[in-house]
Image (cartoon, helix red, strand yellow):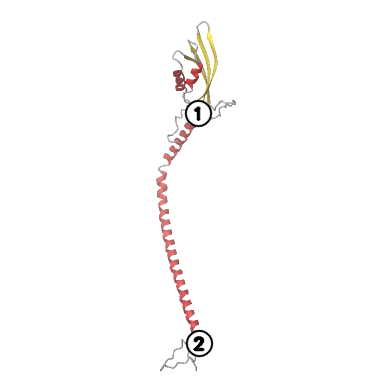
Amino acid sequence: MIRAAKNDVLVMGGEPRVDLLPPEVHKERAARVVRRRLGLGVVGVVAVMLVAGGAATALSVQAQFQLAYEQSLTPGLVAEQSKYVEVRTIQGEVNKVEAAQQVGVSTEIDWKKYLEGVQAILPTSVTIETVAVDSATPLAIYTQPTAPLQGPRVATVTFTAKSPVLPDVPTWLTSLATLPGFADALPGSVTLEENTGVYTVNITMHVDDAAYAQRFVAEGK
């Protein structure tokens, strides 16, 4: 007994068909379909390239027009700038003068004001007789101390003070330390003039860069 496969379907009254074409014909048909699809793909790629090329050309033309327009404005801008050549020249000279001022007074100390501060600290009965100042300049570096306990300085003030009473030099030195830019002070000799009863004191004081006047330093710098 012959049994039909499970998936076999028996068609009753169907139209009988027989494919008598050789396999080469079916392959040729399939090849034609592939070629047709490849041709359409090539046409699509060419179309995309043409569109992209046209867009690039349009952008290039637009850029050239924009460049030509900007270049047409150049003569007018140059003419406008030429009106201010003298102003720029003067401004450059002003900048040079300001820079020279800053360099020239970079080591400036208002000695009148500073010595008035020294006198104000000393007792009212004490007067400053002589003053010698040695300070830095913009062209030379001030000599620094070699002693390990002495700090940097930009100037040295040596003054002679006279007092009708025995001077309290340690208190003087403590008071001098409150001055701006005070670095250190060294007491010198204390002598008594027999004929007048007046004491003479020699003091050497060193000043650091905090005492600079900074007259032409711009705010915020």
Dot 1, crowdedness within 10 Å: few (<14), some or many (≥20)?
some
Q: Residue furthest front?
A: 1
Label 2: element kind: helix
Count of marks overlaid on the render: 2
Q: Residue furthest right?
A: 146
Q: Which numbered disc, 1 or 2, marks the residue that appears first in the sequence?
A: 2
Label 1: element kind: helix
Which mark identifies residue 209? 1
Q: Residue flagged by tag 2: what amino acid is it?
A: Val
Residue placed most toward the observer, 68 or 216 = 216
Which mark identifies residue 25? 2
Residue in view at x 50 percent, y 86 percent: 26
- Location of residue 160 with respect to 45 vertically, above or below: above
Residue in view at x 41 percent, y 45 percent: 81
Instruction: Please state the horizontal and vertical placement of residue 138, each as a whole percent of the image.
Output: 52, 30
- Location of residue 45 with respect to 7 vertically, above or below: above
Residue placed most toward the observer, 187 or 53 = 187
Instruction: Please state the horizontal and vertical placement of residue 149, each as a whole percent of the image.
Output: 57, 26
Instruction: Please state the horizontal and vertical placement of residue 124, each as a whole percent of the image.
Output: 44, 14
Which mark identifies residue 105? none
